[in-house]
Amino acid sequence: MNDEIDSINCPNCGKEVEWTANNRFRPFCCERCRLIDLGEWAAENYRVPGEPSAPPDIPDSESLQ
Ligand SMILES: [Zn+2]
């Protein structure tokens, strides 16, 4: 049996990404996509496609005026 590398598509740009331990940006293809997606995630009413992946620091909406 061969080791099959699972691949997914980057949620941000749709690029194919190998799901490996080396990919620290997974499920994104790169850090940029990850940051962009996290930014939109925070801005867009917490629209989470799958499971929340422990976002680092989301500013609380209570700080809005
Ligand atoms: Zn991407």
Image: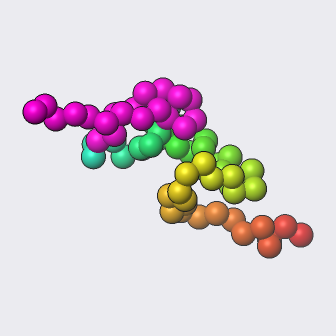
Q: Residue at x 75, y 56 (%)?
A: 45
Residue 44 in the image: x percent, y percent? 74, 50
Which residue, as the protein is rendered here, is positioned at the far left? 1
Residue 15 in the image: x percent, y percent? 48, 26
24 w.r.t. 45: above or below: above
Residue 56 in the image: x percent, y percent? 53, 62
Q: Nearer the viewer, residue 25 or 5?
A: 5
Asked if the magenta segment contains residue 53, the reply would be: no
Q: Nearer the viewer, residue 51 or 65?
A: 51
Q: Nearer the viewer, residue 21 or 9?
A: 9
58 w.r.t. 6: above or below: below
Residue 9 in the image: x percent, y percent? 47, 32
Q: Which residues are magenta?
A: 1-20
Dominant secondary-structure state across the stretch colored magenta: loop
Q: Residue at x 68, y 46 (%)?
A: 40
Horizontal placement of 4 versus 50: left or right?
A: left
Q: Residue at x 56, y 45 (%)?
A: 35
Horizontal placement of 30 versus 55: left or right?
A: left
Q: Which color mode does the image show?
A: rainbow
Q: Quadrant of residue 46?
A: bottom right
Q: Residue at x 78, y 67 (%)?
A: 61
Horizontal placement of 3 versus 5: left or right?
A: left
Count numbered badges in the picture.
0
Q: Nearer the viewer, residue 62 or 50?
A: 50
Which residue, as the protein is rendered here, is positioned at the far right? 65
For the C terminus, give its image quadrant. Answer: bottom right
36 w.r.t. 41: above or below: above
